[in-house]
Image (spheres, helix red, strand yellow):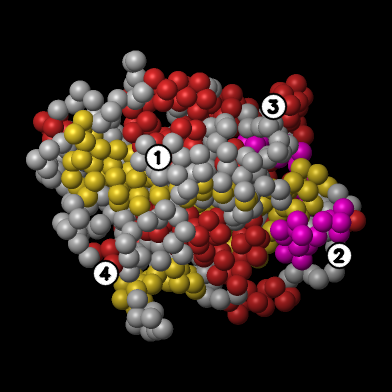
Amino acid sequence: MEYNRTELLICSAARLVEDNCTAFIGTGIPMLAASLAQKLYAPNLIPIFEFGGTGALLVRLPRAVGESRTFYRAVAASGICDIIETAQRGFVDYGFLGGAQIDPYGNLNSTCIGGEHDHPKVRLPGSGGGNDVGSHCWRTIILMQHEKRRFLPKVDFITTPGYLTGPGAREAAGLPRGTGPYRVVTSLAIMGFHPESKRMMLLKVQPGVTVEQVVENTGFELIIPDHVEENEPPTVEELRVLREEVDPEHIYI
Amino acid sequence: MQVLESGIGELLQPYSMEEFREWNRTQKPRGFVDKLMSEQEAIARFVHDGDYIGKELYGTCRAPMSLARELVRQGKKHLRAVGQGVLELDLWVAAGLIDAMDITYHGLEVYGVSYALRRAAESGKLKLVEWSNGAITWRMKAAAMGVPFIPVKSMLGSDTFRYSAAKVVECPFTGEKVCLLPALVLDVALIHVHRADRYGNAQVEGISGFAFEMARAAKRVIISAEEIVDTEEIRKYPDRTTIPYYLVDAVVHAPFGSHPGEMVYRYERDEEHIRDYVQASQTEEGMKAYMDRYVYGVKNHQEYLELIGAERLEYLKRTCVGR
């Protein structure tokens, strides 16, 4: 069955979350991944939205992190302090993040590109809840477009901390122990982080993609293990649910 | 307590908790005063040039859009803003009302980056100090608590910290590093709610966003409400009062006050209008044309609603999912 890059990204991410877990969901593709996961793999996934929605049934796709769909038939509707504090005291298992740039340690930029901070070449929206998610969630899953200009040795601005400068750096900065980036999902590959060096490591290539292609599109040296599996392509069932139930209004796909 | 690191961002709103207490003692009547007034009067009386302003919830969700448009019509100048926003911030930045912002997120959500922000920030016209969403709300929480700062574990190790006005210290109890956020006392806050009485007792349905914190962190609070109810109605459900009357300075009746944003359980967001807005906002000319039609082209919120049309508004009510 034919699928596009966005659909591949969503299906790959949806398979990563376990059932009976809490996941912090941001605007865009994470919402679709969470909704697909809830419908196929993790019926008891508790989506948490930063402005107060906890445990919504993602029957209709939210278009904003504060909108009514983020707490439709939810178990709780509180406010932003409660949500971020819940993450800060260790209750949020997964956090989904995106960004314009990423480096080998999973540091993310969604603030500005080029120039100076007070005179940037491109001004992006800023942290939003990104920094909070990346600081407090146990496992952060990053969804990105895989391009050389986005996978850089050094990001222009660390909006959200990954492993910062390497092993021990998060803890040295005062960030909670045992947290950090877990997976990076792109339309070319699924990557993790080396347990010792904390540098990004290739885990799986997407269907039909070669290791060389991944390397070519990555602006830093990626750790390549001896054996790299190919990720399963989106199934007919995943694509049907995604198109007919997750985003029937075609807001994102 | 030794300061280990300091952000290089400017503290845009210097504050004193003693002054804030004094303000709350002398400037906020405890009596039940009728505060119901027009949006023109509320903005004219309670927002001043140079003010530090905030709004809640969020440009497309329970947003005080009618007040935001009135602010543009009155052309208040040299404002500083707390910047978690979508459409309301966009209008203010595009109209050149804002000189500086404590920014967390300013974008168009599903529609991507804000063109108005890009034009203002990339030309260097708009001063930006960085924070996370959690951090900015905790800053208001500190003010709401009446304390000068609050320790948190966000922002550590990042450039978001470096370009903020926060500080890192060693915790005197545990020895770990913590980020200290300065309290944020706003000059004025605009908050849109489901219902309020004429004294300012305000009730919100659905998520409370940061209405609780912002209302308690501001010197002046303007409430716009979908519905004005008798105090008896408020007294039936006191557990729903997010904002009690003594925090509030003005109450404005604003049905569909969040349009083109949504109001949970009441009306859907106007997707068509938002798309047209996004399209228009891509250029300065487009933005000007939009503002000429929907902001400057109408005298008040009533005229704005007539321009949108009863049929459209009915449709947004009808398509609202409810509970």
- Checking the image for residue A161, the label placed there is none
How many numbered tags mark residues here? Answer: 4
Q: Residue at x 15, y 40 (%)?
A: A219
Q: Residues within 10 Å of mark 4 (few under 14, many from 20)?
A: some
Q: Quadrant of the N terminus of chain A?
A: top left
Mark 3 or mark 2, earlier in chain: 2
> From what the image shows, is residue A141 above or below residue B22?
above
- The residue that disc 1 covers is B118
Chain on which label 1 sits: B
Q: Is residue A56 above or below residue B250?
A: above
Residue type marked 2: Phe
Q: CA distance from mark 3 to mark 2?
A: 38 Å
Closest to the camera, between mark 1 and mark 3, is: 3
* Quarter where residue B309 is shown: top right
Residue under mark 2: which chain is it in? B
Q: Amino acid at mark 1?
A: Arg
Mark 2: secondary structure: loop
Residue picked out by circle 2: B32
Rendering coords of residue B277 (x, y %): 54, 29
At 75% from the left and 53% from the top, the residue drawn is B203
Residue at 39 percent across and 20 percent down: it is: A236
**Residue B293 drawn in magenta:** no
Residue B309 in sight in this render = no
Q: Of the numbered discs in the image, which one, if any, rests on residue A172?
A: 4
Task: Look at the numbered disc 1 and give the secondary structure of its residue.
Answer: helix
Segment colored magenta: B233-262
The reply, left or right, for residue B236 in relation to residue B258 is right
Identify the disc placed on residue B319.
3
